[in-house]
Structure formats: C-alpha cells, structure tokens
Image (spheres, grey):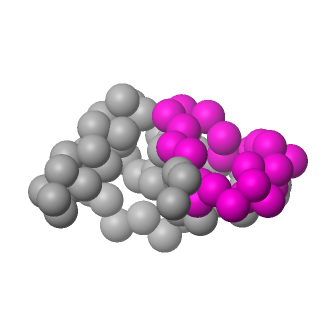
Amino acid sequence: MKILITVDCGISTLNEIAFVKNLGMYTIITYHHEPHYEGVTNADAIINPKIYNSKYPFKNITSCVVSLNYAIFNVQLL
C-alpha cells in the first residue's frame, strides 16, 4: 500500500488529492488551521484538532505537533 501523508497542507487541494487517490494511494492530511468547510478535500483521513467534530482538548497546537502525535501513535502500534 502506498500512502501520502501531508503536513500543514492539502486540506483544500481537491484536484491534487483526487489525482493521488486515482493512482491508488491512501491519503492522510495533518493540519492545524481551522478549515473552510466548503471545499475540504476528500482525503482518506484528516487529522486536525480544529475540525468541527474533534474531541482533542488542545486546539492550538502546530502541525508539527499534530504530525508528531500521529507518528508516536503509529510507532506504538508496531
């Protein structure tokens, strides 16, 4: 399986994510800004503490911390 993981970009790149998904890649977007809900990408996963239904308690972290937390989670799965 091929995976594309973005850090602090990709939340509104509809065409680019669609292109990558057509190549058969799984897409994960890590982001920390409040997204504009019109035109949010159709990624397989969006990891963002400011997304409307997030229960994450620390809303003001950077994308580096979002991505680091994602990496730590994945290492713990190994």
> Relative to residue 29, is residue 74 drawn left or right?
left
24 drawn magenta: yes
Residue 77 falls in image quadrant: bottom left
What residue do we see at 42% from left, 64% from top? 54
Judging depth in this view, the residue of 14 and 19 nearest the camera is: 19
Residue 71, percent from left and from top: 27, 44
Figure disc tally: 0
Judging depth in this view, the residue of 44 and 35 nearest the camera is: 44
Q: Compared to 67, does 26 lie above or below?
A: below
What residue do we see at 25% from left, 54% from top? 74
Judging depth in this view, the residue of 2 and 6 nearest the camera is: 2
17 drawn magenta: yes
Residue 33 falls in image quadrant: top right
Residue range in magenta is 4-27
Q: Compared to 12, does 22 lie above or below?
A: below
Single out the residue that lies furthest toward the right: 15
Residue 68, percent from left and from top: 28, 37
Residue 44, percent from left and from top: 59, 65
What residue do we see at 50% from left, 34% from top? 7
Residue 16, percent from left and from top: 80, 43
Q: Is residue 28 visible?
A: yes
Q: Is residue 61 visible?
A: no
> Relative to residue 23, is residue 29 drawn left or right?
left
Q: Quick one: quadrant of the C terminus?
A: bottom left
What residue do we see at 31% from left, 59% from top? 56
Single out the residue that lies furthest toward the front: 1
Judging depth in this view, the residue of 70 and 2 nearest the camera is: 2
